[in-house]
Each structure stands twice: as C-alpha cells, then as structure tokens.
Amino acid sequence: MNHTTLHMFNIVAEEQSVTKAAKRLGRVQSNITTRIQQLEEDLGVTLFVRDNKKMALSPAGVNFLSYAQKILSLAEEARQALHPGKPAGLLNMGSMEATAASRLTPVFQQFHHRWPEVSLTLKTLPTRQLLERVRNASLDCALVSLLPDSEGLTECPEDLEFVDVFSESLVLLTPRTADGSNVRLAAFPRGCSYRARGEALFISQTAVEVQDVSSYHTMIACVAAGRHCCVLPESVAATLVLPQDIHQQFLAEALTQLVWRKGYRSPALEAMKQALASASNL
C-alpha cells in the first residue's frame, strides 16, 4: 500500500469505473486493475462490488475510503509544510453552487495568475455534504453557509474552523399568479442551508412538499411553471434570466463562510484565505 495506489483507489471510488479512472489518470486500465487487486489482497477485504457497468464501494471500501483520503491529505499537508513560504501543490476546495456561480470566477482567475503552482480543484455540493467532506479530509476547505442557532450565533462543528467571507441577500421567488396555498418549494437536496431557510417558511404546515432540483436554472423553470417557489441569493438571481411573472421578495441576510479542519495549515490554504478576503463584501 503506497501513495500512488491509494490515489488510484480514491479516483476509482469517485468515478465508479476503472475505464474512467484510467482516462482521468492517464494510465492503462490493466495497471489500475492490478493495483486495486493488490490493495485488496494486502488488506484482506473486497473494496469494490463489481458488475458490468460500474464498480461500487463495498461496505469495507466505504470504511477504508475515509482513511485513504486522510492519508492522502496528510501526505500533501506534509509536502507543503516543507516549503512554508511558497503556495504550491494541491488545494482540494468545495463550494455551494451559489457561491461558485456568482463569486468565484474572478477570485480563481486572480489566484491562478498569482499562484500558478497551486493545483486547484473545486467540488460543488450542499453545505452539509461539504462539511462532511472537509471533516473526513476529502476536501481541504469549503465555502458553506452555516446556520445560526436560536441566539443568532453561527453553529460550526467543533473540529472545524471558519471565517466569514461573503454576505448574501436571500430572496424568495414566487409566481405572481400563486394563491399561496398550493405553492411548493423547489430546492437543492437536503443539506442545503438555503433549502432549510425555505422550509422554515412553511413551518406551520405538517409536511413541507419539496421538489429536489440539481440546478438554479431548473429551480427557476419550476417557479415559472406556476406551482413552485424557491430561495436563492440575490447575486445568483442577477445572473439568471427571470420570467416577467415572477415575484421577488427579500427574505433574509445569510453569511458564507470558508471552513477548514481545525489545525490544518498550508501555504495554498493561506493564499486562498487572502484571495477571498480581498474579494469579500463584508
């Protein structure tokens, strides 16, 4: 078991396919297959459930994946620690779809121009899923929206650190023809902080009917159809073409935070913090 094999295992787990993993890694399929088989023999377990179409992680594979990701993350952290004055190496970053859509393009352009030796990757997911990936070390940091507690204080897992980066004005979009009783919520899957805020609007109802969507364009289409409402940042709404018969109403202010594992430090992360601070609207 070595760094290269663990990296291959991680990519196959992500792609659920040796063929796709080989293309992504620039290696022949037989080499990856042999490495995975050797890893399974070394560990004495079956890591993947194989069929004709994909390779899904077995229960043992799911358990081992978190350890593999931590080992890879720690190895990269150690590599960067040997060169503390120069941002370089990998920075695996996560973000909410909204932040990626409305805030990150100029930040990433400037970051790459200043620090070209940093290999930056981006994964978009809802806040809860991003927090899980930062905690298990599959992501180094992520831009999320942490919900406040009953006293208005930001709730963050104890093993994570955070800094406020952006302030977003959340708006509620509804069809102008809606009577208010049959309107449902179109939102990203559970774990999305903006979805939670939208569900809170219907708290008096015994069950909130929510349609899961995968993009803001689909969300707007659902509202345009006259049977859904949605919650999104005003900065995102400004990038979309909204139908004329949609009503837009201010809902609340929400903060976007950058989170990372407590104690984790790297020149690349510090450089990203500085880049985001320069772009912050706080």
Image (cartoon, helix red, strand yellow):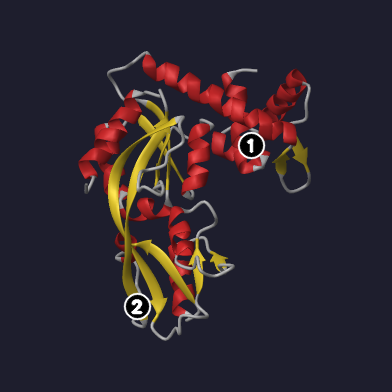
Q: Earlier in the sequence, mark 1 or mark 2?
A: 1
Residue 27, quarter of the rendered image: top right
What residue is drawn where x is 38% and y is 83%? 176
- Would residue 117 be seen by someone viewing this image from the given angle? no
The disc placed on residue 166 is none
Q: In the shown orientation, is residue 255 left or right of residue 264?
A: left
Residue on which disc 1 sits: 12
Q: Residues within 10 Å of mark 1 (few under 14, many from 20)?
A: many
Give the amino acid at mark 1. Val
What residue is drawn where x is 26% and y is 47%? 106
Residue on which disc 2 sits: 247
What residue is drawn where x is 27% and y is 40%? 276
Kindly report the distance in space between the C-alpha atoms of the residues bearing marks 1 and 2.
Answer: 45 Å
Residue 12, quarter of the rendered image: top right
Count how many numbered circles sit on residues in the image.
2
Q: In the shown orientation, is residue 223 left or right of residue 2?
A: left
Give the amino acid at mark 2. His
Query: Dot 2: what SS?
Result: strand
Q: Is residue 215 above or below residue 42?
A: below
Residue 23 x %, y %: 58, 39
Q: Are marks 1 and 2 in contact (CB under 8 Å)?
A: no
Residue 74 x %, y %: 49, 21
Foreground residue, 162 or 43? 162
Residue 63 x %, y %: 67, 31
Q: Is residue 25 above or below residue 188?
A: above
